[in-house]
Amino acid sequence: MSSSFGTLFTISTFGESHGIGVGAVVDGVPAGMSLSEADIQPQLDRRRPGQSDLTTPRQEADQVSILSGVERGLTLGTPIGLLVRNKDQRPGDYGEMSQIPRPSHADYTYQMKYGIRASSGGGRSSARETIARVAAGAIAEKVLREQWGVEIVAWVSSIGDIDAPELDCQGITREQVDATLSRCPDPAAASRMEDLVREVRDAADSIGGVITCVCRNVPAGWGEPVFDRLEAKLAQAMLSLPATKGFEIGSGFAGSRMLGSVHNDPFVQKGARLGTLTNHAGGVLGGISSGEPVLFRVPFKPVATIGKTQQTADFEGNPVELAAKGRHDPCVVPRAVPIVETTAALVLLDLALRQKMRQ
Amino acid sequence: MSSSFGTLFTISTFGESHGIGVGAVVDGVPAGMSLSEADIQPQLDRRRPGQSDLTTPRQEADQVSILSGVERGLTLGTPIGLLVRNKDQRPGDYGEMSQIPRPSHADYTYQMKYGIRASSGGGRSSARETIARVAAGAIAEKVLREQWGVEIVAWVSSIGDIDAPELDCQGITREQVDATLSRCPDPAAASRMEDLVREVRDAADSIGGVITCVCRNVPAGWGEPVFDRLEAKLAQAMLSLPATKGFEIGSGFAGSRMLGSVHNDPFVQKGARLGTLTNHAGGVLGGISSGEPVLFRVPFKPVATIGKTQQTADFEGNPVELAAKGRHDPCVVPRAVPIVETTAALVLLDLALRQKMRQ
Amino acid sequence: MSSSFGTLFTISTFGESHGIGVGAVVDGVPAGMSLSEADIQPQLDRRRPGQSDLTTPRQEADQVSILSGVERGLTLGTPIGLLVRNKDQRPGDYGEMSQIPRPSHADYTYQMKYGIRASSGGGRSSARETIARVAAGAIAEKVLREQWGVEIVAWVSSIGDIDAPELDCQGITREQVDATLSRCPDPAAASRMEDLVREVRDAADSIGGVITCVCRNVPAGWGEPVFDRLEAKLAQAMLSLPATKGFEIGSGFAGSRMLGSVHNDPFVQKGARLGTLTNHAGGVLGGISSGEPVLFRVPFKPVATIGKTQQTADFEGNPVELAAKGRHDPCVVPRAVPIVETTAALVLLDLALRQKMRQ
Amino acid sequence: MSSSFGTLFTISTFGESHGIGVGAVVDGVPAGMSLSEADIQPQLDRRRPGQSDLTTPRQEADQVSILSGVERGLTLGTPIGLLVRNKDQRPGDYGEMSQIPRPSHADYTYQMKYGIRASSGGGRSSARETIARVAAGAIAEKVLREQWGVEIVAWVSSIGDIDAPELDCQGITREQVDATLSRCPDPAAASRMEDLVREVRDAADSIGGVITCVCRNVPAGWGEPVFDRLEAKLAQAMLSLPATKGFEIGSGFAGSRMLGSVHNDPFVQKGARLGTLTNHAGGVLGGISSGEPVLFRVPFKPVATIGKTQQTADFEGNPVELAAKGRHDPCVVPRAVPIVETTAALVLLDLALRQKMRQ
């Protein structure tokens, strides 16, 4: 059941990049909530290709259809079927490529695991699979917002070696994030990032980056010790996204270099609740949300498909040269911003519903 | 079911730090394998307190008993009950502390989640809970070693700002790791780390560090797309450990700064199999093991309990000063080495058994 | 995740009776198997309404589409999306009925559980939901047949008080079952059953019946002690079907009246394997298949929707009279035969794949 | 994870009949509830052997210990470890028997499944495994009683061909049930049942029976469509008990013989809620509790171990004679009464907690 995620709020995804479409069954959505495709489409639009000259010029509408679970504009509490049809694209004649596992792609490992792979290569490892999660996560975001006022905002905090300055995670908005093509809310850093991406693109190469995400207004008490800690489920969900190579919550790797007397977050009264002066913890203590903002970072490796010629080997082990044709993203992180947000929502809503068993 | 982990090889843990004991039910162990407490105890011994002057001077034997699933020295294929009794320690009179949530501990969030907490504070967030995982993981290690020749070795790669030089992950052994008190196999770095830990200890403070882990001889094909990717389940498992604040596989955060043409791992024939020249991927492609070493890093924050006086607030929000009494680890990472190894084994064996459905 | 079933071979269903369609995501199908809609449609055709004058005269084509997981006629090992579109049927004006919970329907309990219900009443409790299971189960049947030679045959063994004589469960075929409209392979009993159904239909009433099912060539060793015993998962699956009120395996209720010396099935050599002379066990011992035919029975209550006037109460508790309009089945058991077969296949394939972890 | 059951209220059992003990990890118990061994022991006492001359004369105390999850008499919300030690009984020298799979026992199928089996035969298929469920279920009963006023009462409704008259399921109490050795609350029937059991016992034979169970005060709304319907989970749980061969809810098999106009349960106002005049449904509609009593029946086959000589075959297929030595129950159903009750509680509490996600 590895295409499923969640205990009470659950998602099961399906679909290859070159088949009829991609979709999901979403279960656990509360009944009686107003819901339509218009609630879901905006995050898909932020994710889709062709948004700017920083992304692949491929154009895909990625229009979502709700197949079930909603009637007369209200959720029934039953599973919601979601479908996004692929544009009519038959698995091409990949001739040469079918004999060559693309470096740092999943061609080789899918072949070893299943004894077969989608002729188009990508299959389930394709970034198109994330469409289903974004659609499901957009529903989760709506529930979280309406029931608890949760706000989730992600942004690009670095591309290559260009780092945005530390940002105020309390105030940042999606509007600020979307104000630049690179989705870095610091205009100066954004400008340099965009120059870098264009330079890399023109060199037929690719570049990675880091996304930072904050979840505000998460009540204290979410997260299930011990294996389903909030940060553990976030880490699983983020590392299940294509191209991610890590995860940090709060102080992260830098925290490992600190003294306890510096790292500890002192408690202090904050309005009606207890809070902390600092937030090295990243909003979790013992795997449970503390009421402070949940703050995490996810690094994305550079896109594996590049136009530059690479020396590699075919499935038989013979040395070959490979240069990808077609149109690819030089840098995925701007488009990954809504993916990280909606994936965080999948985690949070499931833990929110699980906490209800105690109420 | 948040104290359980795994799909086919599963573990369910129980136990508080100040109760009768901690333990686990381990299911999915292959039948007919020789097994006794002697297979499990060595990793518990590497984990237990009191091993050196770098750790808490508390002495606990942490002797494991097998309660079921083994007869005449052979596993039956049925659940294995494991129990490690706590030494006779009644929940003390925590007087003052019971009114003060310790900074960066789980006292506050357990109270908010459950409306009650263990009087000793730690409860399930205590590091003692990991005893159950280490015991279960030691069984998993044995299965992995005997059936596939898998070798898992973890070591301390940094404490505070002292970094070990890059090590040859192909050759490193547990003997090399255990040759120093700090479990850093580079003697020079180890010596400086140990000096730092003693300095921190004498200052009644604590310090964090990073553990690196390699899993060798993992066959290609383990890992279940899309939510149960190998790196996703490793990330969940590692972030479910107390004090961890992140996870990296392969190139990790540094990989986000690279060009695709540099980061891509070219394929090359390696003996009878296809391998890669570099291993920025960290042994996984598309969430599935590639046959290259699985390589990951886990940062641990400094221990929250310190003797130094801290300014904080009690549950009512009143400012208070707190200074921990008792004996605590100034740095947990040396003792966390076997925890990381055995936790990795829990993940790998479950995915190994799941891949069998395709054979 | 209550619309999902299975551990390794899994199904997640969605869809209301009056929405866009019903469907499923099916995961765990082995890779490299030839598969097309033509493998699935026959069982849907055996299930669909309008087959004879014994069933509702409603006509629905119930054509299945495979949305993913198959390429060039072969399964990829990835999730298979299935969709059966409903004919264009807007939720009608149920005016009166929306205020009256239909007796022995789920209108009342859905309202109590979700605080809302599909205006058409049926929603997820509708028998249309079973379309998704039949489609998924038809795939499971193909895997079971090709990999292990498993044959599953169900038939109508009673309708009302008309019982078919005991049949030879070793020889019975689907062709024999389909030779009569009632799907009772005993022609004499079938004829009397059909007369009864027509009589009931003409009285605007309904009648129940029992389906018996045999699974042949199930190898010894399937079934997971203790909660996922073969008979336990069969019982769950059968009782999760609409209108079922029970389950028996082997001797069933009658077995409770026997002496142990009569009920015990003596072992005897059967060709290359050990078998039993009798099969009161119904093919399972200790929850694990024995190699003998798995034999079980499922009673279906009479259809709740009847044309006859019924005295009942509306949601406010006011006494009302209700007489269903529209066209309904006087007896569902002939159409339920493929549902029972395919549901059994869902159970067996999951347990078959789980047993592979031991090989 | 086949020794585990439940989604939010979960149980994982372990233990063989001849090992150190049997036990369970119970997760999902609400925090802050008073709990001690004294809440659990009574149901274990009703289950234990040696209660009367109707049961095996073996004497076992079956004293439960709580290992975790409770402090100062209150639950912490964390997993509760339970252990019942076996009396010191080493796996005997079963000499002859180890070569002969006992008819209608699991010796043969465990050997086929695992390639090994406990030398004592029973292993996990032994009725001793149910001790862990009874202990866990006794905790569930307490939660259900305190939070919702749920009352669960089971009784023996038939042994062999001796049927108790239909009883008033609204009024029946455990005291009435325990008033007779046979746990049949009808004294006349009980007396005849007890005579029959003694007669069977003296003939070195065994006999089966049926247990009926009612769950009162179950609120409307419990049960998760579609695979985790209330009756589906009850059926799974009951069929996962040793020696059970079936399950009926409400009208059961008899319902399949009725007309819809007779079987339908008309709604009627009952105090503040809507109820039904009859209860052929058995308290569930569409898999969801209706507020009417949940009523089900479970048949138990005769005990397989009998003193009478049986003709059978050894593992090699050679014909042999077998006569069990030792002391066995001639009829298990009186002792199975608390097993059925506590198993029902496991199901109900899990579904109760799952319904809380909607509140």
Image (cartoon, coloured by chain):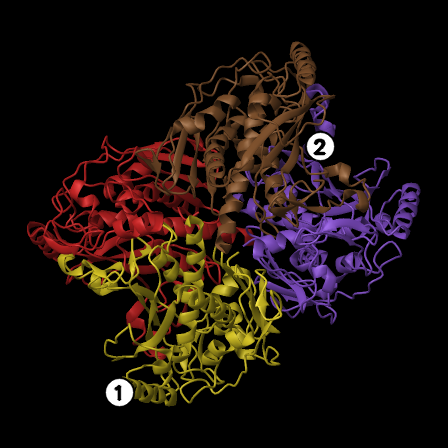
Chain colours: A purple, B brown, C yellow, D red
Query: In 3D space, how far apart are the residues under numbered discs 2 and 1 (Cα atoms)?
Result: 76 Å
Left or right of B117? Residue D184 is left
SS for dot 1: helix
Residue located at (64% from left, 12% from top):
B201
Residue located at (45% from left, 53% from top):
D351
Question: On screen, D167 above or below C172?
Answer: above
- Tell me the residue that label 1 is attached to: C188
Q: Can residue C86 be seen here? A: yes
Residue A351 rendering spot, x and y as whole percentages = 59, 46
Residue located at (80% from left, 55% from top):
A323
Point out which mark residue B124 bears.
none
Provide the chain ID for the residue under circle 2: A
Provide the chain ID for the residue under circle 1: C
SS for dot 2: helix
Question: On screen, D128 above or below B331?
Answer: below
Left or right of B311? Residue A323 is right
Q: Amino acid at mark 2?
A: Gly
Q: Can residue D72 be seen here? A: no
Residue located at (62% from left, 18% from top):
B182
Residue B150 rendering spot, x and y as whole percentages = 53, 37
